[in-house]
Amino acid sequence: MAAPLTLTVNLVARFPNSVSADARPGYSGFIVTKESLTEVATAIRDEFGYDLLTAVIAVDYINENKMEVVYHAYKTTGGPGLVFKVQVERVDPIEVPSLVEIWAGADFQEREAWDLHGIKFIGHPDLRRILMWEGFDGHPLRKDWKEAFYEEDTKPFKSRWPDGQFYMAESKNPFKDNINFPKDFDPDTLIVDKEEDLYSSLERHSTKDDDGLKTDHIVVNMGPHHPSTHGVLRVALTLDGETIVGLKPVMGYLHRNHDKIGERNTYLQIIPYTDRLDYFNSMSNNFGYAITVEKLMKIAVAERAEYIRVIMAELTRIQNHLVFAGTLLNDLGAMYTPSIYAFEERELILDIFEEVSGARMMCNYFRFGGVVRDIPDHVMQKIKDLVFERLPAKTDEMERFLNENEILVARLKGVHVLSAEDAVRYSVTGPVLRAAGVPYDIRRADPYSVYDRFDFDVAVRYNCDMLDNYLIRFDEIRQSIRILEQAIKQIPQGPINSQKPAYQVRVPAGEAYGRVESPKGELGFYIISNGKPNPWRYHVRPASFVNMTALEKMCLGTKIADFIALLGMLDIVMGELDR
Amino acid sequence: MENETINSPGYDIPDDIKNNIAVTTIDRLYNWGRRSSVWPLMFGLACCAIEMIAAQTARYDMSRFGMEVMRPTPRQADMLLVSGTVTKKMLPSIVRLYNQMPEPKYVVAMGACASSGGPFKEGYNVVAGIDKFLPVDVYIPGCPPTPQALIAGLIKLQEKIDKQSIRTAPWYSKMKDPNYVPMPILGPDLIDVRRNAEIRDAAATKESA
Amino acid sequence: MFGKGILKGLSVTWKRFWDTYLEDISWMLRGKKRYYTEEGIKHRSSADTKGIFTIQYPEEQLILPEEARYLPFLVYNVDAEGKKEVLCTSCGICAKVCPPQCIWIVRSNDPVTGRPVPEPTEFYIDGDICMNCGFCAEYCPFDAIKMDHDFAIASYGRNVLNMEKLLKPSSYYEGIRPQNFAREEEARKAKEAAKAAKAEAAASAAPTA
Ligand code: SF4
Ligand code: SF4
Ligand code: SF4
């Protein structure tokens, strides 16, 4: 959380004129002046060794008339992170230097901050909107921007109780729908954006090859409706023959305004929304959010609940990776059989989730200080059956079924994904980073919950190719089973929540960034509390979204047929990517 | 088994040929054929899509209803299963897919989001229900509907198909594309072009912020 | 040898294929029914399941765990004279805690005195917004709202639930969640006993006052 004292001294001592410690109560890190941001950031990366920039978060302090950009940098060798911030006047145009040159992984996150907060990043190579479409009116995450179905600043709404009268939100909006237009807008005179910016960012030209044959580059749009983009992702590609020479992902087709809705919700109400981020792994999402709020509230978690949390999170990881293998094979053309086998195990794991939490996918199981319900004995028995017998056997079976298959190996082996340097530069986390030979796993690098009590290895492979990316998922399943075996043996009896159940929690003012190793990579939550029942700023740092930054790097120069597999390697899930 | 569903009531078939013969009306035969091969469009939007996939897999096995043939192209699909949150950015694509589907076509709104916007209804990028644009045949509440709930909803759709008659079916009428939906446009916000005049009036009388 | 990996993989599918029949035979030899029986369904959803995995909804149904949740419902008791006693006191906690804010409670006043009475006049839940999170049931202090198990609720229209549709007797609740019901009953009895004991103690302590 807070940076160690020695470092604090260092950064301020190193840049006495441009860096100061953030002294607001409950806050930590450093405030850097806008002018020297690039210089300080370079020093943070090169001199202090914080090579992984994980999060770029914009915050609107409308009352202080300020905008702030918060950066979180970590070392891939582990340890706590370094937080630095830059503050600017909240007067348009709001301009901040871009850090894409230093950490390429800042690319999409800066675009997101431009899109939703309207912060211009000077020097950004391709600053377009990312989640909303070009031409959308306003920057929705600014605190003075109101959406069509706006009712009140914070929940609960008075119209539900005490003055409850049923109505549909549509009836209160002048446009009778979830839309809002500027005054005197006339749809007939609208000039529709033809996405010229997007296409001009994809270089496009004709070339003469060696025989003097003139060939044209063609632009292909894959998605948003495409069977193997894992949801509603769109990728615009420029092709030279079959080789990819330009690529831009277009996202936002599932942008459900998590941050905006989250800032209106009370702390408790956010939990079920986090389920719907990475909808394969609701337990991991709950986990990340719960530890972040617990950090803010400074409460301990009941001992038994810690173990239950770990058990659930690891079960989630196993089913996620099995399904990953299934869907990847689907993408490669082995339609259905592998994924049907994978879903069988997933169903059994979901049965456990349903029995403890009540729902298969949207578990809503974690509460601040613990979990909502204990694991009944018969479910514990079922977990034991799965962990000690069925899952190891089935993982073996899955490996026997697929991993030596010559077609699969021929397809995956030697297709380069990302080198270690690139992966770190592009802020890639999760299995893709580890398959590039960087043993960076938050469960080890910056242990949370009770992960430091278990004996497990960080799965790592070194070939950086697709086959390694694929096999590492199986390594991780085995490690998860190892953790589960220990957790089941060690789990103590006792209460499952250290707090009294309460629908309104008191969260002291301050900021917190909590992160967990979700099956897809680093899932972070950044929350600013001002002591009220609702967070002032609620931001999700999704693994899929940041990993996508590297897609262009991964795919340029490869054949289009490999593109689907490369995309599959990132194991993206749209709910988390677009939020 | 099949004989029972296809056989028209009111005709007594002698016992000895019961398994070989069925007397039916054209409507029954026609609807029986259609309801037993409703091909969904391979199209997933959000969390609900995962439950839709789960319903396709071994445990629930939608192929028992003739619905396992997921078509990636709308030209071959009979049913648009709107499985998840419909965002404004995505809506033009969905409407286009719908328009490209041949008649007869059905729309099933799976889950709270597709029915009304669901938990994300208040969001600025969320369409408050696909029924604002497409004619929805069956609404399946739930967030997400479990695979069993989805199948229960699809059985409802089959019941609906059973009640249709070849004589009144709109897709055989002279009208060209009876269900055509004009494409919405992305401007400062989502524009339903059928409501241009209404939007202009509302924008003119809106008090400026 | 090239192709060994593929053969190895095929051996897995081959084994899986035969597992179904071997299981069928072994169940037959033991004189038990594998399909359409509770035992069979339980076995097919346990960790030792082998071979066919399908639960043939709607003929068979997965056994829902007690905690399973779908849409909420309101509980009422039937008292000795057969009058409905709605447990809800319109305290509003569920409406306050509901994340998508899909509960509307209309409080009621006594027609004679004009004072507020606990029972709500109307209670709306927009079933197409509800995200099935279960918070309302979890935080209701009067155990008046509970999560239903009924998932086959697809309909041809939007699904706004009013009081009439929401109310279900406590016997129904006992049926779907026996353990929870027993636990709550026990707690209630203990509380009442404590109250009675306290009242008695108060009465005996100050008999003349
Ligand atoms: S209804 Fe629920 S599960 Fe389905 S897409 Fe919407 S949020 Fe996701
Ligand atoms: S919390 Fe319970 S008692 Fe209070 S209004 Fe809701 S249902 Fe009624
Ligand atoms: S289950 Fe959740 S969303 Fe549904 S009514 Fe209850 S609190 Fe609201």
Image (cartoon, rainbow, N blue to C red):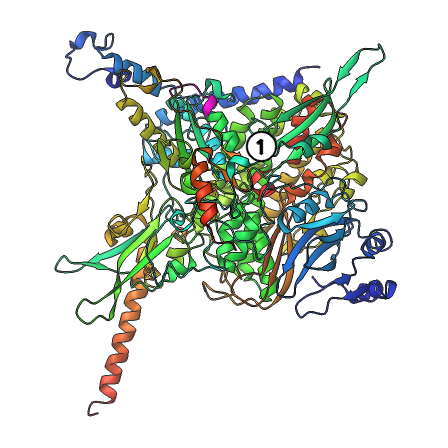
Is B14 placed left or right of B37 in the picture?
A: left
For this view, does A517 lie left or right of residue B140? right
**Where residue A460 sits in the image (x, y, percent)?**
73, 40
Query: x and y percent of residue C115 in the render?
Result: 24, 71
Q: Residue at x 71, y 25 (%)?
A: A238
Q: Inspect this view and state whether residue A488 appears.
A: no
> What SS does tag 1 mark?
loop
Q: Quadrant of residue A245?
A: top right
> Number of callouts in the render?
1
Q: Which residues are magenta?
A: B99-104
- Magenta span: helix, strand or loop, mainly? loop
Q: Among all residues in the image, which is located at the extreme left?
A: C81
Residue A90 lies left or right of residue C14; in this view the side is: right
Nearest the viewer among B136 and A423 is B136
* Residue sticking out furthest to the bottom: C208
Q: Between C147 and A485, which is closer to the camera in this rendering?
A: C147
From the viewer's perspective, tell me whether residue A33 is left or right of residue C23.
Answer: right
Residue identifier under label 1: A230
